[in-house]
Amino acid sequence: MYALLLKLLAKLWKNPKLIGMIAVVGVIIGLAIALWLTHADLQDAQQKLAKASVERDAAVNALNKQNAAIDKLKATAAAQADALAAAERQAQQVKVVYRDRIKTIKQTVVPKDCKAAVDWARDQALQLSDVWSG
């Protein structure tokens, strides 16, 4: 079989035009195969790119939603911190007023009459409760 192939090649080698045509056909076939493979690779790459683009868009949307949620939580936390600070200031003010009022009550002369003492205590308690209720 190899001998037959060698004889055929020896005869063909003597005809340069035929060798040139075979070479050109070989190059054309090689280019066609390369083009077909490149086209297949290009289609695969385009599909992968399209899939990656969809995944990227989904990730960006998810990230934007998370960022919006974080911003909302930050705003809520800031509002709560402000409310806490205001409540602490108010509690401190009430504490001062309450302490001063208790000091005043302790220094005040309590009526000797039982009914008058009860009425006085009730009035003092109402005044203190007004301090707490603001």
Image: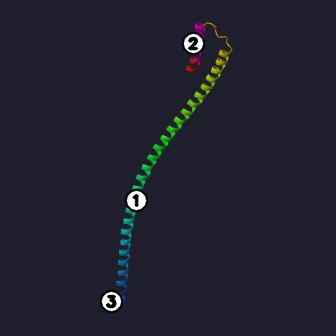
SS class, disc 3: helix
Mark 1 belongs to which amino acid? Lys
Q: Is residue 92 magenta?
A: no
- Circle on res. 5: 3
SS class, disc 1: helix
Marks 2 and 3 sit apart, C-alpha to C-alpha, by 127 Å
Marks 3 and 1 sit apart, C-alpha to C-alpha, by 46 Å
Residue at point 49%, 43% (across, down) = 67
What stretch of residues is rendered in magenta?
Answer: 114-128
Q: Earlier in the sequence, mark 2 or mark 3?
A: 3
Rendered location of residue 84, percent (x, y): 57, 31
Which residue is denoted by mark 1 in the rendering? 48
Mark 2 belongs to which amino acid? Arg
Mark 3 belongs to which amino acid? Leu
Q: Is residue 117 magenta?
A: yes
Which residue is denoted by mark 2 in the rendering? 122
Residue at point 35%, 75% (across, down) = 29
Q: Main secondary structure of the magenta part?
A: helix
In this view, 52 is above or below 133: below
Rendered location of residue 118, percent (x, y): 58, 10
Q: Nearer the viewer, residue 48 or 102?
A: 102
SS class, disc 2: helix
Q: Nearer the viewer, residue 130 or 43?
A: 130
Rendered location of residue 108, percent (x, y): 67, 12
- Circle on res. 75: none
Say which quarter of the image contains residue 134: top right
Please state which of the two labelled residues, at mark 3 or mark 1, is closer to the viewer: 1
Relative horizontal placement of residue 65, taking residue 40 as reference (left or right):
right
